[in-house]
Amino acid sequence: MSPTNYLLLSGLLFTIGAVGVLVRRNAIVVFMCIELMLNAVNLSLVTFARINGTLDGQVMAFFVMVVAAAEVVVGLAIIMSIFRTRRSSSVDDANLLKY
Amino acid sequence: MTPLTPPPIDYAAVAPLLIVLGAACVSVLVEAFLPRHQRWPAQVALSVVAIVVAGVTLGVYAGDAPAQGVITLGSTMAVDMPTLFLWGTLLVLGFGSLLLIADRSVEPGGAFVASALERASAGAAPGSTTGPSGVDPEHVDRSYGAPGDAPTMQTEVFPFTLFALGGMMAFVAANDLLTMFVALEVLSLPLYLMCGLARRRRLLSQEAAVKYFLLGAFASAFFLYGVALLYGYAGSVRLSAIAEAAVGTDRSDALLFGGLALLIVGLLFKGSVGPFHTWTPDVYQGAPTPATAFMAACTKVAAFGAIARVLYVAFGSTRWEWRGVLWAVAIASMVIGAVLGLTQTDLKRMIAYSSIAHAGFLLLGTMAITQAGTSGTLFYLLAYGFTTIAVFGIISLVRTADGEATHLSQWAGLAKRSPLLAGVMTFLLLALAGIPLTSGFTAKFAVFSAALSDGMAPLVVVALVASAIAAFFYLRVVVLMYFSETPADGPTVSVPGAFTTVAITLGVVVTLLLGVAPTLVLDWAGAGGFTG
Amino acid sequence: MIALAPLLFVLPALGALINFLAGRRANAWGHWLGVATVVASFVIGLLLFFETLGLAPEERTREVSLFDWIASGSLNVDFGLRLDPLSLTFVLLITGVGSLIHIYSVGYMSHDPGRRRFFAQLNLFVAAMLILVLGNNFVMLYLGWEGVGLASYLLIGFYQDRPSAATAAKKAFLMNRVGDVGLAVAIFLIWLELGTLQYTDVFARIGEVPGGTVLAITILLLLGACGKSGQFPLQSWLPDAMEGPTPVSALIHAATMVTAGVYLIARTSPIYNLTETGRLIVSLVGVVTLLIGAVIGCAYDDIKKVLAYSTVSQIGYMILAVGLGPAGYALGIFHLLTHGFFKAGLFLGAGSVMHAMNDDVNMRHFGGLGKHMKITFVTFGLGYLALIGFPFLSGYFSKDAIIEAAFAQEGWQGWVFGGAATLAAGLTAFYMTRLMIMTFFGKERWRELKGPDGKDYHPHESPATMTVPMIVLAFGSVLGGFLLYSIGLYEWLAPSVGELRELEGGVLPHALVPWLVVAFSLLGVVIAYLVVGRRPTPVERPSPVSVPVRAARRDLYANTINETLIERPGIWLTRALVFVDNRGVDGAVNGIAAGLGGGSGRLRRLQTGFVRSYALSMLGGSVLVVAALLAVRFA
């Protein structure tokens, strides 16, 4: 199977993630959509590693996973704290700062 | 199987970075093991010493650094003249911000909330925007001191600051895109948290943190996808390898330009440029003011340092293709910043729009792939950073019983009550507007003339118009301070403690010095170019 | 001797500094210090002048470099002086007339509590003006340019308690800024093209600059000149500037500062020599201005404003002259010098009249003053004759030369320039005669009136500190033209502005022109006598009547020309201009501001506060950037 298909899949997943960020209200789901985007990138990194015949891309995917994990820690902490204050996890409720 | 040889490391070159990151790790340990009442002095001492030592190390190294720079740590770091300049800038700006962060005299316990109070007010009715006033004594964790005691400061902000600073330093020196990505996250994650730490106005602060985090992570994903595409294009993420590949490769240019576009979107987000600025006003307004100062000054330096390096080293040869697009982005940024700033009523928000306009001006300098463009950008970053820190320092001093008075109407007639503060603020605003004899003028001059000589005359005209429009809203504040009647329940001006005083004085003096005698710093900024 | 050159401007600057800083202690002697510094400068100027006169013509341009002023990167600016015939001529005019006016001010300001401040500002002006003319590069020119602007602003607003003075000062400042922007941009352009701002280098290498840029530079320089010299379309601040004390009007707004525009064009003559179009625009501006000034001058009753519009008009002549290129630079400077004498004298005379008439400026309240102030009358009268070009007085030489040169142009330019200049000469004679008659002749209308301060008028001659400078200037008005002409001013100026080109060709025979000009002037005098001199002048200004029939029935023939033909259209024109200004110019400015504000108010609604809409804008921006980059590459 041609590697190009994996790239297309990766692009598709990235797009789904981006659209998800736009359409979902729950902060946790929005955040998961962003994780989906990161993992879509991982897929294309690994595919490019295969195409290029080097290991760099696979190593980079590991880096990305670690970074994503750190991001989860920080992100969940922030979302939890605002959830405690507001008793709501909808991103549309946090709407005091505008104009 | 060949033995694994670790790459050689030029420790002297990267010492400042290692010192800051090492101090950040120690700072985490301090937070974990020291009793609460000892943490503030220990953390302040540690951070200040770390930054000063890093600065001295940098100075010693820069004294006889090779002019063409060194590439070390297995070619992941390029320590060249712009890097050294940016490191120096970041360290002094970080030092100034740190002083603002550490200050406890203006607001009892500092601007950063202790978690006990946070937990306590979490139990209070949501919707209360004035924080600890609704504290239920039952929920107060006694280990943080009795409710009647002066509130303690959340000292976690110190390791955050140091990590963010280290991340920024790595960001501007990164010689490959993966390092740049990791550094981007190292600098961003602590900033997200710092935004949510305001002692008062908790809802605003947390909202700012959520917005910044979600949008920042979103932008990181774009950046990363750009990295992936460029990796697919060049087979490597080293900046120089991308530049080589751009000259001759059989891969599709769609990868190159798609990758560049996504990469640059991620970077422009950090620099709060153009259509990617949307987070800036909300976050600047919601975050605690010292954290805003740190973000506004240092993040700008890091973001534009990285943009300049990427464009110069990796995409210098393809500039004719991408320049038109960045023209549009720069124009959008300048227009958005200048026009939207006109009707802002919150001072911090106004400065945020001003920073968007300034980001557009800075983009002019980075787009000029010339020595003058680089040195102009570097100088601009230094000048803008100092002015901004001093501005936010001043803003943190004008307070009502509810906290900082950032609404413009509250600043009316301030000159009658505090002529000194109003005078300093006026000077700083004039610097932001780019009036001669301030650093803002010299910086704009340097950047615009570089852009002009690299064939961007129409853009410079737009920039001049935008700065004329932007001057209006700076002057509006000045007029308000001097020629308006004081409201009856106007804010008071706090007497700053030593830390804030030093930070503001530093900012003002540098703003004046760079305006009057810019030659020295300009020479230094122009000492050498990027190394690929 | 040349080592003394810096003292030229250092002395007045010191005078200004001491007077500013010394406070009340200097009240007793500050004004004499001011006088002394300027007189000393004049003496130094004379010494330098005679030294230069002793040199061969090609050695007469000397440069003194004092210190490196700005040295940053490729921009290097000397703080250096250029002593050449042009700058020395100006030095003598500024310090000479300046000395006289300083002396005059001692008497004129003797009762004013702000006298020390006045002298400090006057000294500041002299210092700045000397820097302007002495600098050897454009940055020093700009320094002096802004310095005189500042001094002018301060002095126009000298009577701080009068709102009208504050408004006038602001107006002058603002309109000058418009011009200054032109000058600044011109300097930027020169630097951008040549990388240097020293006159010597710029003039040597200006040929390398492409023609379009040279034209742009000349037009921008002209804009600067228009602002400073009250030329069309920036002329309207100058009459308002008469709110300042009269010696200021004489020195700054008649003799020296307002001629800086002429200096600028003469100084940059190597640039103007390269562009025919640029010079044509200069001449056109001069012609339009000299007509505007002369026409409006006919309509005013305020003695100082009439003189002010006369100044506008006369500077129009100079600008016309320098716009004629090598055939006119020296003529412009010549007229500038003679005008400096007689106009300063006229203003001092007007000041003397005001001094005698309780600071009233309305000529309708005067009349028959000649009997009461003989010295003022005679000196003023000589200045008047010089201004209208009475044969063999100084204005005759300089103005006729310009009109001749104008008629010597080929084609329509000859007719338009020459015709307008001749017509304006006639108008000049008309309004000046009207002024003379209303002030010094006829019925003593002031006998039945109270002054603006509520007291009776007691006209009297002014003290000697005031009359002596007037007498000296009157001598200058009578003899200056002939002297300058006969000692060879044109040859003297040749090293700076080039040889004066001989006139040839043109649309009228040269011998005819002086006759024509004198005839027109005479006509102006006669008409003025007929409409003003033969009938009593109403004390109240007759309000403009709406229909000519009623005017005829009332037999307002005496005022017909004055009020119906000139003033009413003038008022209409003014109203129309005000309307255009309010609705058009201000409307555009306010409209832009309102548009920006409104746009800002609407656009900020886009910042909805919703994270998801922010994400949408980011995604939209990213898609656009990706699409644009790919389109640029593959389209």
Image (cartoon, rainbow, N blue to C red):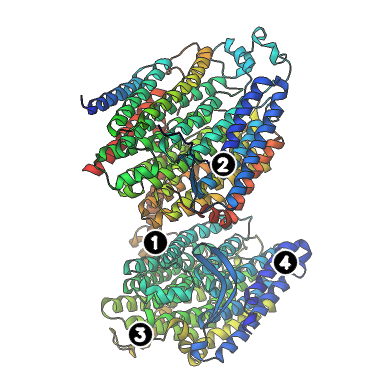
Image quadrant occupied by the C terminus of chain C: top left
The earlier-in-sequence mark between 4 and 1 is 4
- Disc 3 and disc 4 on one polypeptide chain: yes
> Which label is found at residue C568?
1
Name the amino acid, label 3: Leu
Which is more foreground, mark 2 or mark 4? Answer: 2
Percent across and percent down for residue B45 are 69, 33
Residue found 64% across the figure and 12% down from its top: B135
Q: Which residue is mark 2?
A: B11
When the figure is inspected, residue A1 is found, relative to residue B468, above or below; the finding is: above
Rounded to the nearest angstrom, the CA distance separating label 4 from label 1 is: 50 Å
Which is more foreground, mark 2 or mark 1? Answer: 2
Q: Which element carries disc 1, helix, strand or loop?
A: helix
Q: Which element carries disc 2, helix, strand or loop?
A: helix
Q: Which residue is mark 3?
A: C516
Residue C3 horizontal side relative to residue A45, left or right:
right
Residue C528 lies in what quarter of the image? bottom left
Q: Nearer the viewer, residue C516 or C105?
A: C105
Percent across and percent down for residue C231 are 43, 67
When the figure is inspected, residue C120 is found, relative to residue B488, above or below; the finding is: below
Residue found 27% across the figure and 27% down from its top: A7
Rounded to the nearest angstrom, the CA distance separating label 3 from label 4 is: 53 Å
Name the amino acid, label 2: Tyr
Disc 2 vs disc 1: Cβ atoms closer than 8 Å? no
